[in-house]
Image: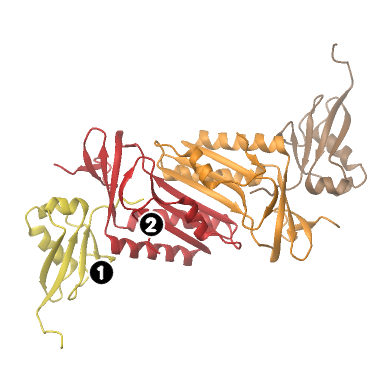
Chain colours: A brown, B yellow, C orange, D red
Amino acid sequence: MPAPTTQLVNVRVLLFASYADRLGLESVRVALPVSATVADALDHVRSLPGGERIPPRPLCAVNLAHASLGTRLTEGDEVALLPPMAGG
Amino acid sequence: MPAPTTQLVNVRVLLFASYADRLGLESVRVALPVSATVADALDHVRSLPGGERIPPRPLCAVNLAHASLGTRLTEGDEVALLPPMAGG
Amino acid sequence: MAFLSATPIDPAGLVGRVASPAFGGVASFLGLVRNHHGGRAVSRLEYTAYGPMAEAECRRIVGEAESRWQVRVALEHRTGALEIGDIAVGVAAAGAHRDEAFSACRYVIEEVKARVPIWKKEFFQDGDVAWVDPTSASAPHEAVRE
Amino acid sequence: MAFLSATPIDPAGLVGRVASPAFGGVASFLGLVRNHHGGRAVSRLEYTAYGPMAEAECRRIVGEAESRWQVRVALEHRTGALEIGDIAVGVAAAGAHRDEAFSACRYVIEEVKARVPIWKKEFFQDGDVAWVDPTSASAPHEAVRE
């Protein structure tokens, strides 16, 4: 079956640790316009109840690698919003 | 018994590793004039057979601590001539 | 090889994985769970990770160290519940020279702290529970229950 | 506590001697017997020390590190015959912060190499035997039998 032609990109946004606690969410599915960026996915999450408690410029990742807010998203991307890390 | 009055200080000079090999000696007793220094003890050792193969300014120790060639010696001191160290 | 471990880290095992007859020096670092933080008594803690990314990021960091210096690096980070004194993270770097071993070891632990998505929830003796935020100097913790 | 040891060094034992619930980081260094030196294959080696001075100097070095940084330091150096891969020297430094632990560990190993009267005789696979002279760049070894 060919991939459906669409004007939207579907991505999954993961939240962790304090961010997950603040929204009571660990994962959100978001449909964004083509040419959307990480910043657009973030805007969506920050519009959810409790979302204002995510900082305006958190650390972000796309597909398991650090990414900037300007990174373009494509269908199926896994976006992650990362609180300040505390490993080690 | 009071310490004997003497015009000499008796010291022991220890040699290690390559220095001991070069002289075929690990320890030498030396009687030096009062106010003698480590340099005087070294001069004595370097005057022994094979002693010219001890460098003119080796690392030295007196009584288990690093010392300079100018260190004054007193009766019973243990002087050591130390080849380049290779610990670690 | 997994970099995240739900079971205790064995420091001798880390060293054994990098030691080789060609390498003269092994520098290592162990991060232990301290009994205090910000002047308050800690009783235990929990590490949670974004697992697949943490694995990928650890692999990248080790690869960077091994291409920048002539070293072999082992890295392991705990997840889950830890007690005081437990090893939270272990790094071992073997090199032909100690300078490289130290540099690589230090690089890896600094990059792990900066880049690997792992979070720490501290349980204080007074009953408080808080996520550790190393970037917040004035308020080192964010209370979990606000 | 003796700093020189005629029996194998146990890295876990070194770490255990310095680790404490107040300290968050342990940096350590192990110096291993390499199978080569100056491009030649080494089969084994022997360490000889000026024992009483080596003990005194190690004690001074550890004391210096412990007063300069907030750390606890363990140090052990082998004497006698060692095989390839054996641990020749081990240093562990525990501190409240990793910066101090790394600095102290590095300080101790550098000072040990510079100041502690220990000498190393290398037995090469080709049958040569030589005292190691780290200060001699052009001729790293002095043949024992000249």
Residue D137: image location, x then y, percent: 28, 42
Three-letter amino acid code of the residue under disc 1: Asn
Q: Are marks 2 and 1 in contact (CB under 8 Å)?
A: no
Q: Secondary structure at mark 1?
A: loop
Residue carrying label 2 = D111
B64 relative to D73 in the view: left or right = left
Question: Image point 48% across, 58% down: which residue?
Answer: D104
Q: Are marks 2 and 1 on the same chain?
A: no
B10 relative to D129 in the view: left or right = left
Three-letter amino acid code of the residue under disc 2: Glu
Residue carrying label 1 = B63
Q: Residues within 10 Å of mark 2 (few under 14, many from 20)?
A: some
Most extreme residue toward the right, as rendered?
Answer: A49
Q: Quadrant of residue B45?
A: bottom left
Residue A42: image location, x then y, percent: 84, 38
Question: Image point 21% across, 62% down: which residue?
Answer: B80
